[in-house]
């Protein structure tokens, strides 16, 4: 296989992953967007977390909410739990890396808030601990996972929403996650502002 074929394979595989995900996730993504908007309209906030590329996705989502997605609108209350280096390093050093998100959820989360929990494997221990803390705070969880949903798929409550990308390769899961995030942002804006 030459490099052009290798690159082409990435496009083909990404398209297939998105088509497969579209079939199973369009309705749950719409439900998640409605839930996020209800949270925001009730003066709640969205807290997002994840590791590595998922941390970048959490930060990306929060930036789209606080700033804007594609249309001008007032900022919406969202924050990434993966961006405060002082909190992350203090909690990781003084307690345990598995608690870097859960301690923040306990400190900042309120009943009615939403946790956007992102883990491509569905098995990130610190994200799982954040979900447990969110449940303690009577927060709803919207989980973005992949593969078989991992342990996260097993611990969600009936009030939570699982957006599990049904593919195995991490790169493809991450590509669909960013598409889901954009779809959520666009749906929220559509419900707030209407169509073009």
Image (spheres, helix red, strand yellow):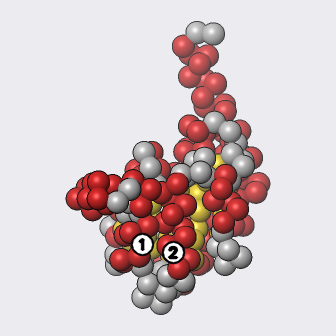
Residue at image location 47% in from the left, 90% down from the top: 42
Find residue 103 and report its horizontal and vertical position in percent.
38, 69
Few, some or many C-alpha atoms within 10 Å of disc 1 (few <14, some 14-19, many ≥20)? Answer: many
Q: Is residue 167 above or below residue 4?
A: below
Residue placed most toward the observer, 15 or 77: 77
Distance from the alpha carbon under mark 2 to that under mark 1:
6 Å
**Quadrant in the picture for the N terminus:** top right
Left or right: where 153 falls relative to 53 = right
Q: Is residue 168 above or below residue 140?
A: above
Which label is found at residue 105? 1
Residue at image location 29% in from the left, 54% down from the top: 93
Residue placed most toward the observer, 151 or 61: 151
Residue at image location 63% in from the left, 36% down from the top: 169
**Reading the chain from its start, which is encountered first: label 2 or label 1?**
1
The image quarter in which residue 12 lies:
top right
From this viewpoint, which residue is outermost toward the bottom?
Answer: 42
Q: Is residue 39 above or below residue 146?
A: below
Find residue 112 and report its horizontal and vertical position in percent.
51, 85
Secondary structure under tag 2 reads: helix
Residue placed most toward the observer, 25 or 47: 47
Residue at image location 60% in from the left, 47% down from the top: 121
From this viewpoint, which residue is outermost toward the left?
Answer: 86
The image quarter in which residue 68 lies:
bottom left
Which label is found at residue 193? none
Reading the image, the residue beneath label 2 is 134
Find residue 10 and report its horizontal and vertical position in percent.
60, 29
Asked if one can make out residue 17 in the rendered structure from this viewpoint, the answer is yes
Find residue 136 and report its horizontal and vertical position in percent.
53, 79
Left or right: where 99 falls relative to 160 = left
Few, some or many C-alpha atoms within 10 Å of disc 2 (few <14, some 14-19, many ≥20)? Answer: many
CB contact under 8 Å: marks 2 and 1:
yes
């Amino acid at each position: 296989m030459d490099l052009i074929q290798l690159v082409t394979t990435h496009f083909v595989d990404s398209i297939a992953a998105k088509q497969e995900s579209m079939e199973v996730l369009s309705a749950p993504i719409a439900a998640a967007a409605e839930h996020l908007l209800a949270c925001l309209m009730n003066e709640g906030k969205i807290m997002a977390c994840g590791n590595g590329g998922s941390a970048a996705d959490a930060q990306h989502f929060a930036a789209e909410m606080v700033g804007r997605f594609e249309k001008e609108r007032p900022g919406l209350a969202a924050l990434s739990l993966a961006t405060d280096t002082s909190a992350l390093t203090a909690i990781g050093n003084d307690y345990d890396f598995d608690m870097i998100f859960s301690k923040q959820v306990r400190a900042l989360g309120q009943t009615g808030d939403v946790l956007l929990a992102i883990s491509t494997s569905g098995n990130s221990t610190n994200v799982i601990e954040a979900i447990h803390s969110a449940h303690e705070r009577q927060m709803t969880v919207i989980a973005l996972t992949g593969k078989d949903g991992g342990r996260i798929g097993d611990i969600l409550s009936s009030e939570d929403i699982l957006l599990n990308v049904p593919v195995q390769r991490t790169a493809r899961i991450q590509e669909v996650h960013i598409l889901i995030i954009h779809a959520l942002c666009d749906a929220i804006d559509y419900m707030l502002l209407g169509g073009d």
